[in-house]
């Protein structure tokens, strides 16, 4: 139970920044102009949690896990610090931003050097943690549980402490089994486990029989796996068309025994190491980076999109914040919404109109978007370099629209697209590659785009119809006869910024085809879009071959809930906007859709959704290139280190079951589940086989869900993982598990066998 083992695993032995964090120090915590208190902060010895003093007496303390940190920002980069501190302390400030709805921690250090040290130290440790493989995470996690179980901190483990430890790691065993295990390891007969005995206990505990069986099957050279044996395993079992050279690289990379490495063998430990890394993951590492053609027209891609991006919570009284934009952009959202209204002192504001949501300055939002849209300097998050669409819901007077135009120009500068690319009127969209690092404005425009080439200053009209999503609720309460066609005056300065995303009203596909240019796009309320996707899918797909479509949640979703995006992707809709602030199954599906291709926020649509000759209909699957029928065999073998759900109850142990769900065209939607296993979240084994028929794999998503079975009430979520069918690897694979909010559960996972065969 050596503390330094944790430091070693994250590669920071002797690092002065780490030593600084472990020693800790006083920081001024800021919550308002009047609430400023000195608090002592320190990195705990586990290198995974921070300790924070919450009262001068040291009687109470609280802390947080580094795994919950989204980013660490140097300077006055949060709304709180900008509001409650002066420019004079800029270089002494930093903030800790959390992944969940937990409030930021805004801090002031005693000097610029100290602030930078806190930031660089935390970023180093978090980066080190992110780089741990599954096996290292398991060791890290088990060490922490042992540390907690070692009540008297003597680095020894009594039988009582061992039982406590087993409950900590989510496994319930009867006393006789615990005693048998204890006696087996207590070779010195001292009544406690220490040193090598604890190591022996750890080895027994983490023994993976299923890995042993697989290894033994292929280790046909003196009980070990030669490079030839490993090649057989990869080609036959994992269905990977790899070469002997690739196998040699794997041995070099993962073999832990130097003699085995020299003899070009892979030992059992090396094999387990390989299985725990990305090559052994269910997600195809070839899809981790940008691998798609990024030069196709913009409307040929699904685009990760957010609705009411400014909201942190619900749509009636929740806070509006620049932080919500930052969080969406850091998740590679590429289309954000700005609901703009006249504000005080001539400054436009963003909020949900006709509601009690708080307001945020338009210019502050644009500054945040400029800084975070294409950010690469964060230590452990890199956003996409592909274009960001700013979807303007414009309710401002002409005067404040001019202010908006000024802020957009002065803040975004040359990154703002104000002219079509090229020297002549385009007939189709440029691609994401050509638009790298650029901002596109979506909104109303007074005239046609060709006016930018022929100096045509005549305008179609000086006012345009207002699409007021925020007023939906209000309008719904009015009688139909009271409804009038709202018109909004449009400032030419703002109108001229709309290039490739001009908002127009949609009536029918025929009308759009005959009257609208490629750059004229419609926004569809979810009910309208779902109806079109259900009843006119082929026509909708063809509409989206020429134009962009944006879908948004109904105004009645006051709790910021989301609709299912899958039917709309099936119909080729690109900008399927969801409430990013709401953790839910629909957001999980969105994150899965955009998981491959470098998580860049753009996914190329299948060829049959781009080819004008295509007659694809998601509901009626006639013969065509989309029909690549696969029989998917999934065996749920085992799980490892599932987290405790009810941490308050020491004796509460998970009873896990696993669901496998398919989302895609209607014929492919399916769900199956295993039986539950009583009292074992540490190493449950199912060995349960499922079979699914997938007709259109290019549109299918596969979702794994682990739940804690409860006969009396709703099952609790333990962890989940969703990925596109086409990014799944065959063979024996580890499936990582995420929390509801999308954070990785470091040591937990499923072990499965996948085989997708032609149907």
Image (spheres, grey):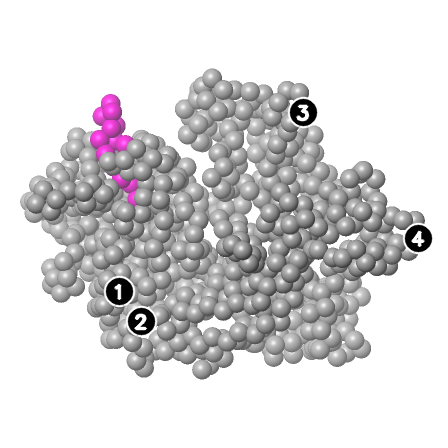
How far apart, in angstroms, are the residues tagged by discs 3 and 2? 62 Å
Magenta range: 337-350
Name the side, left or right, on which 105 lies relative to 142: left
Residue occupying the far front of the picture: 712
Measured in 3D between alpha carbons, the distance from the residue under mark 4 to the one under mark 1, in whole angstroms, is 71 Å
Residue contact at pointers 1 and 2, CB within 8 angstroms: yes
Is 292 one of the magenta-colored residues?
Answer: no
Residue 618, which numbered label? Answer: 2
Q: Is residue 425 visible?
A: no
Residue drawn 71% across and 46% down? 145
Q: Secondary structure beneath disc 1?
A: helix
Q: Position of residue 353 (x, y in %)?
A: 25, 37
Label 1 or label 2, whichever comes before in sequence order: 1
Question: Mark 4 or mark 2, which is nearer the start of the sequence?
Answer: 4
Residue 59 is tagged as 3
Q: Give the residue drawn at x 55%, y 20%.
A: 37
275 and 578: which is toward the camera: 578
- Assign the C terminus to one quadrant of the image: bottom left
| Residue at the spot of label 1 | 533
Gap in angstroms between the C-alphas marked 3 and 1: 60 Å
Please indicate whether residue 22 sits to the left or right of residue 281 in the image: right
Q: Is residue 580 above or below residue 611?
A: above
639, 31: nearer the viewer: 639
Give the SS element for disc 4: loop
Please tell me which of labels 4 and 3 falls first in the chain.
3
**Number of marks:** 4
Q: Position of residue 375 (x, y in %)?
A: 44, 43
């Amino acid at each position: 139970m050596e503390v330094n083992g944790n430091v070693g695993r994250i590669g920071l032995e002797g690092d002065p920044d780490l030593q600084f964090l472990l020693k800790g120090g006083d920081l001024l915590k800021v919550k308002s102009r009047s609430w400023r208190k000195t608090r002592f902060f320190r990195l705990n010895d586990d290198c995974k949690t921070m300790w924070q003093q919450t009262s001068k007496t040291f009687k109470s303390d609280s802390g947080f896990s580094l795994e919950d940190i989204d980013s660490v920002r140097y300077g006055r980069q949060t709304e709180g610090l900008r509001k409650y501190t002066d420019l004079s302390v800029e270089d002494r400030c930093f903030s800790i931003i959390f992944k969940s709805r937990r409030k930021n921690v805004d801090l002031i250090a005693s000097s610029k050097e100290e602030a930078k040290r806190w930031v660089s130290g935390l970023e180093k440790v978090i980066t080190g943690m992110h780089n741990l493989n599954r096996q290292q995470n398991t060791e890290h996690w088990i060490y922490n549980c042992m540390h907690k179980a070692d009540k008297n901190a003597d680095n020894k483990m009594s039988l009582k402490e061992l039982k406590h430890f087993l409950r900590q790691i989510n496994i319930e065993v009867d006393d006789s089994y615990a005693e048998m295990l204890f006696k087996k390891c207590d070779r010195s007969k001292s009544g406690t486990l220490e040193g090598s005995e604890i190591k022996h206990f750890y080895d027994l505990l983490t023994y993976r029989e299923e890995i042993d069986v697989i290894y033994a099957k292929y280790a046909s050279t003196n009980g070990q796996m030669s490079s030839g044996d490993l090649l057989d395993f990869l080609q036959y079992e994992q269905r990977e068309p790899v070469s002997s050279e690739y196998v040699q690289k794997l041995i070099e990379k993962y073999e832990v025994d130097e003699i085995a490495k020299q003899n070009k063998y892979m030992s059992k430990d090396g094999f387990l190491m390989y299985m725990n890394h990305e090559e052994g993951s269910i997600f195809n590492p070839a899809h981790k980076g940008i691998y798609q053609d990024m030069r196709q027209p913009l409307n040929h891609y699904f685009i990760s999109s957010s609705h009411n991006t400014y909201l942190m919570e619900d749509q009636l009284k929740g806070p509006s914040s620049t932080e919500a934009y930052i969080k969406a952009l850091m998740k590679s959202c590429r289309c954000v919404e700005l609901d703009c209204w006249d504000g005080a002192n001539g400054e436009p504001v963003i909020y949900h109109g006709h509601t009690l949501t708080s307001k945020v300055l338009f210019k502050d939002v644009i500054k945040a978007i400029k800084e975070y849209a294409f950010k690469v300097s964060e230590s452990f998050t890199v956003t996409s370099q592909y274009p960001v669409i700013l979807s303007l819901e414009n309710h401002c007077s002409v005067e404040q629209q001019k202010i908006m135009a000024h802020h957009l120009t002065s803040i975004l500068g040359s990154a703002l697209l104000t002219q079509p690319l090229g020297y002549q009127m385009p007939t189709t969209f440029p691609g994401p590659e050509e638009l790298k690092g650029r901002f596109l404005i979506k909104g109303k425009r007074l005239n046609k785009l060709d006016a930018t080439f022929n100096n045509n200053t005549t305008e179609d009209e000086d006012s345009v119809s207002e699409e007021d999503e925020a007023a939906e609720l209000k309008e719904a309460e009015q009688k139909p006869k009271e409804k009038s066609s709202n018109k909004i005056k449009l400032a030419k300065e703002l109108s001229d910024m709309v290039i490739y995303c001009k908002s127009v009203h949609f009536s029918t596909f025929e009308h759009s085809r005959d009257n609208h240019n490629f750059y004229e796009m419609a926004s569809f309320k979810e009910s309208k879009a779902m109806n079109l996707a259900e009843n006119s899918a082929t026509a909708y797909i063809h509409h989206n071959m020429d134009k962009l479509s944006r879908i948004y949640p109904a105004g009645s979703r006051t709790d910021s809930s989301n609709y299912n995006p899958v039917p709309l992707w099936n119909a080729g809709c690109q900008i399927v906007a969801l409430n990013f602030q709401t953790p839910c199954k629909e957001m999980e599906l969105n994150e899965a859709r955009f998981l491959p291709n470098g998580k860049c926020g753009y996914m190329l649509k299948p060829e049959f959704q781009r080819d004008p000759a295509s007659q694809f209909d998601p509901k009626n699957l006639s013969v065509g290139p989309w029909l690549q029928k696969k029989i998917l065999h999934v065996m749920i073998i085992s799980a490892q280190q599932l987290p405790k759900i009810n941490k308050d109850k020491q004796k509460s142990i998970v009873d896990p079951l696993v669901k496998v769900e398919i989302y895609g065209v209607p014929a492919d939607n399916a769900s199956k589940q295993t039986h539950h296993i009583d009292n074992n979240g540490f190493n449950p084994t199912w060995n349960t086989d499922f079979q699914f028929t997938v007709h259109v794999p290019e549109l299918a998503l596969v979702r794994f869900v682990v739940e804690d079975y409860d006969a009396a009430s709703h099952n609790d979520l333990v962890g989940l993982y969703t990925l596109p069918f086409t990014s799944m690897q065959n063979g024996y694979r580890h499936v990582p598990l995420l929390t509801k909010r999308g954070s990785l559960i470091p040591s937990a996972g499923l072990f499965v066998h996948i085989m997708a065969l032609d149907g």
